[in-house]
Amino acid sequence: MQHAATHRAATGADPSRGAWPVTMLVLRFSLFLIIQALVAAYYALQGAPSPWQASVAWWPVGVTLTNLICYGLLRHLARREGLTFWQLIKADFSREYVRKDLLVLLGVILLAGPIAIIPNYGLGYLLFGDYMVPVNMFTQPLPYAVALVALFSFPLTMALGEIPTYFAYAMPRLATRWSSNWKAILAAAFWLGIQHMMLPFIPDWRFALWRGAEFLPFALLLGWVLHRRPRLMPYLLLFHVLIDFPVALMVYQISVGG
């Protein structure tokens, strides 16, 4: 908030106003659907019998492109406020903070495990009778070269484009605009959770419900933690890469027939 105040004093502009904080909340949800629709349109032009179904497999590519777009926008928006991207995500590895931050991070990770896993598995069994049914619906083979690139680009770009969009940029600015931290936390967590309905979009209400709801508790935890201790952002981004890599590896193994 200190950087935002400095920017207002220097330029007269308030970064909490304008369309960008809200736009960044809904942008990823929209981009996932648009990119998948473009892939489906390509398959339709090629005469594929089920173009939308064919587009489902390409969701890791849609994630990578969306992350790069969001990262580019975040850098641009940060510069408008006189910040670097690293200042935006509160990267601070000062010796006086590192030990405390790592201890808090360990506690957050231990708490996040069941909060992330239980809804994921529980909703899968509740809605489909078998957790692997919805997993198999969207983890489909890609061309080998695409799967190889996605193996690294998907988890690495997630660190740059997802959590920073919701919790480093949108959340604190909306908290200022609405004069409410909790409204901003809930809004950011909600949109982080339901973006997965478009990741990929499959016209099956059970799948959409599973994807949209499974990450909401985890997103709420992240929003609260990052509101209370923004310095944890860089550590949580690294953790994000580590937990997304197995998903990318699963897609790669399916693609190569492993």
Image (cartoon, grey):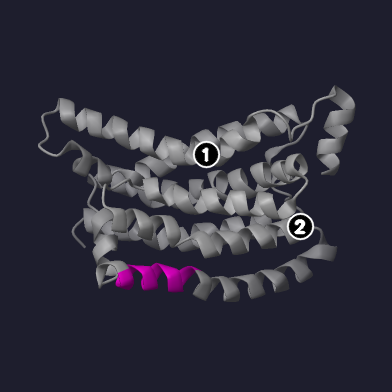
Q: Secondary structure at mark 2?
A: loop
**Number of the label disc, if any, that sits on residue 93:** 2
Q: Is residue 118 magenta?
A: yes
Q: Residue placed at 36% from the left, 41% from the top?
A: 61
Q: Say left or right for 94 vs 170.
A: right
Q: Is 154 on the left or on the right of 190, as rendered?
A: left
Q: Is residue 94 left or right of residue 235?
A: right
Residue 114 picture location, percent across and down: 50, 75
Q: Which residue is mark 1?
A: 26
Q: Residue at x 57, y 54 (%)?
A: 189
- Relative depth, front residue between 34 and 19: 19
Q: CA distance from mark 2 to mark 1?
A: 31 Å
- Tell me where residue 180 appears, x and y as whole percent: 75, 50
Q: Residues within 10 Å of mark 2 (few under 14, many from 20)?
A: some
Q: Residue 255 lies in magenta, yes or no?
A: no
The image quarter in which residue 134 lies: bottom left
Query: Does residue 65 show up?
Result: no
In the image: residue 233, left or right of residue 140: right
Q: Nearest the camera: 216 or 157?
A: 216
Q: In the rendered image, which quarter contains the N terminus?
A: top right
State whether residue 72 is above or below residue 203. above
Q: Residues within 10 Å of mark 1 (few under 14, many from 20)?
A: some
Residue 229 versus residue 122 in the image, above or below: above
Secondary structure predominantly adopted by residues drawn in magenta: helix
Query: Is tag 2's residue or tag 1's residue first in the polypeptide sequence?
Result: 1
Q: Residue at x 78, y 46 (%)?
A: 179
Q: Label 2 is placed on what type of residue?
A: Phe
Whether residue 230 is visible? yes
Identify the magenta region: 116-126
Specify the quadrant of the image occupied by residue 71. top right
Q: Quadrant of the C terminus?
A: bottom left
Q: Amino acid at mark 1?
A: Val
